[in-house]
Amino acid sequence: MMLFEWKELASVKRELAARNWFPGNSGDLSIKVSDDPLECLVTVSGKDKYKETTEDFVLVDKAGTPLTDQGKPSAETAIHLEVYNKTDARCSLHIHTVDNNLISELYGDIGAVTFSKVELIKAFGIQEAEKLTIPIVENFPEIPNLAHALGEVIGPETQAVLIRNHGIVVWGGNAIEAKRNLEACEFLFSYQVKRLHAQAANLKRIINDSEERI
């Protein structure tokens, strides 16, 4: 059974690598293998995620202890375990991009960023007229404290959490769903950054003024 999860996570890793979403060897991925006892595959620490090897992932237990000799688990394994303890997710992705870092800093003091009237929020099973709120937590240097902070803001509808200047954690019922949620989040973040630029430059007024002169 673990072979299926391994291949599923490897496929997601391959697609994210193609998007250059592992800058500076950042980020980590995991997929649940067993509910009871809780066991999951997580990326091995220090490996180049743009390359594929037979030792990309290591099986860990509910405490993050490796159960195989594939290598040392990611230092942020506790974040993924917190997601599995708080939700029914089977796949968790932690990714750093310029846009998700920018959004987490711009809205960090508010503690969340909210989107509405944007088509891509439908990826989360809600309608365009509704609201999607993504919590933002502070970036604690101690991973257990960071994992605890993450767990504190996970509610029944939460499918992603931003860490201030430390990327996003997003999850789903399987690897495909988690990747879909990540892609939707990154679209929304990119849209919001460009929207803020457009507002600052008064582009709507400039366009309206130019149309009136035609």
Image: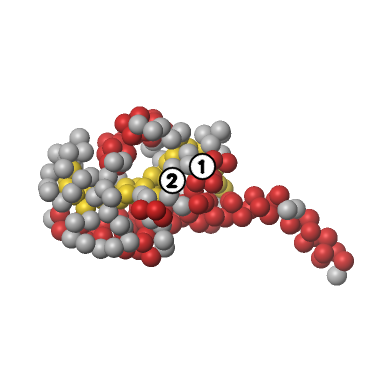
Residue 75 in picture, x, y percent from top left = 29, 41
Q: Residues within 10 Å of mark 1 (few under 14, many from 20)?
A: many
Q: Is residue 21 visible?
A: yes
Q: CA distance from mark 1 to mark 2?
A: 8 Å
Left or right of 128 on screen, residue 140: left
Task: Identify the residue at horizontal 12%, vertical 48% (top origin).
Answer: 69
Residue 122 in picture, x, y percent from top left = 47, 54
Nearest to the observer: residue 15 or residue 66: 66
Q: Residues within 10 Å of mark 2 (few under 14, many from 20)?
A: many
Q: Amino acid at mark 2?
A: Gly
Q: Which residue is mark 2?
A: 167
Nearest to the observer: residue 115 or residue 81: 81
SS assignment at label 2: loop
Q: Give the vertical position of 99 relative to 36 (above or below).
A: below
Left or right of 17 on screen, residue 35: left
Nearest to the observer: residue 129 or residue 165: 165
Residue 125 in picture, x, y percent from top left = 43, 51
How many badges with numbers are in the image?
A: 2
Q: Quadrant of the C terminus?
A: bottom right
Which of the marked residues, 1 or 2, is nearer the chain's N terminus?
A: 1
Q: Which residue is mark 1?
A: 104
Residue 26 in picture, x, y percent from top left = 37, 50
SS assignment at label 1: helix
Task: Identify the residue at horizontal 82%, vertical 64% (top origin).
Answer: 210
Does the CB distance between marks 1 and 2 fall below 8 Å?
A: yes
Q: Amino acid at mark 1?
A: Ser
Left or right of 194 on screen, residue 86: left
In the rendered image, the residue lying farthest to the bottom is 214
Q: Quadrant of residue 203?
A: bottom right
Q: Quadrant of residue 38?
A: top left
Q: Quadrant of the N terminus?
A: bottom left
Task: Identify the residue at horizontal 18%, vertical 60% (top origin).
Answer: 54
